[in-house]
Amino acid sequence: MKRDELEIELKRLIVDALMLKDVKPEQIDTHAPLFVDGLGLDSIDALELGMAIEARWDFKIGGEEEQTRTAFGSVRNLADFVLENLNATGAAT
């Protein structure tokens, strides 16, 4: 899967998993922060989004806290993180 396709899928997942009624996937800036500024998500949203990502791509999010925090910084970072994990596990997309 290409990163730009994955970014679109992640935006849809964010809207669906977090039930963001007033946000459309195409309104989410790929480079904008997901938390506080930008989309304004909180820690509960992070947990829900993490579970949705784990369920969708069948890998566990864990490991180093700083790496995970960076990964959830933006849609672009999240796409890179998912791609890294898929490549590391050899999982199909």
Image: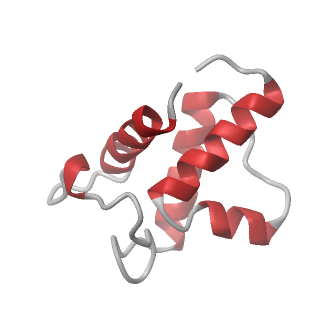
| Outermost residue, bottom side | 37
Above/below status of 87 relative to 7 = above
- Viewer-closest of 22 and 76: 76
Image location of residue 83, percent across then percent down: 64, 37
| Quadrant holding the C terminus | top right
Colour approach in the figure: secondary structure
Residue 5 lies left or right of residue 28; in this view the side is right
Q: Residue at x 50, y 30 (%)?
A: 2
Q: Residue at x 52, y 41 (%)?
A: 52
| Outermost residue, top side | 92
* One can see residue 59 in this view: no
Residue 37 lies left or right of residue 67; in this view the side is left
Image location of residue 66, percent across then percent down: 77, 72
- Viewer-closest of 40 and 75: 75
**Picture quadrant of residue 70:** bottom right
Image location of residue 86, percent across then percent down: 70, 31
- Viewer-closest of 48 and 86: 86
* One can see residue 50 in this view: yes
For the image shown, how many numbered marks are present on the structure?
Answer: 0
Q: Residue at x 14, y 60 (%)?
A: 22
| Outermost residue, left side | 22
**Picture quadrant of residue 55:** top right
- Viewer-closest of 77 and 47: 77
Above/below status of 83 relative to 62 = above
Image location of residue 81, percent across then percent down: 65, 48
Q: Residue at x 78, y 69 (%)?
A: 65
Above/below status of 35 relative to 5 = below
